[in-house]
Image (cartoon, rainbow, N blue to C red):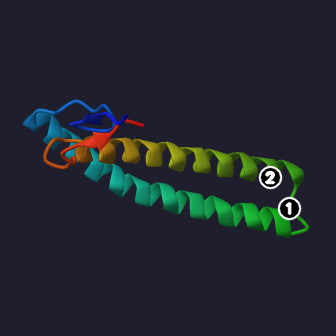
Amino acid sequence: MIKLHSGSAFCIQELLEDERVETRSELEWLEKDLVQRRARLAYWARRKQDAETLPDVPEDLKQDTLYFYRRAVRYLQTGERLRAFLVAEIAGQPEHTSAYHMEQ
């Protein structure tokens, strides 16, 4: 037997109008910040590739480059996770949800 539920499939509570405006502005800021995060990751990816391919790069510089590359990857991933949460929160509001969904 299938149970049908109305509302959000993500258990997201309905936001008040001022909370929606705040969430949208936070999402706008995050979109701009993600552009910078991707550029930072691209920079450290180039430095990492140079450190791995050039023969005369000291080992400590290689390790530092790898460290900052990993930090840039984590920094981008956390921003992407936050963006996904904010998009789901906005999309989960009553005017965006389907009328019903099936229980899995």
Question: Which residue appears at 58% of the width and 64% of the height?
Answer: 42
Residue topped by disc 1: 57
In screen coordinates, is 18 left or right of 44?
Answer: left
Question: Which residue appears at 32% of the width and 44% of the height?
Answer: 88
Give the x, y percent position of residue 82.
40, 42
Residue topped by disc 2: 61
In screen coordinates, is 103 left or right of 67?
Answer: left
In screen coordinates, is 14 left or right of 81?
Answer: left
Q: Quadrant of the N terminus?
A: top left
Inspect the image, locate mark 1, and give the three-letter code of the amino acid beneath it.
Val
Inspect the image, locate mark 2, and give the three-letter code of the amino acid beneath it.
Leu
Pointer 1 local density, CA inside 10 Å: few below 14, some 14–19, many at least 20: few
Give the x, y percent position of residue 58.
88, 56
Q: Nearer the viewer, residue 63 or 21?
A: 21
Give the x, y percent position of residue 80.
45, 49
The Cα–Cα distance between marks 1 and 2, rounded to whole angstroms, is 7 Å
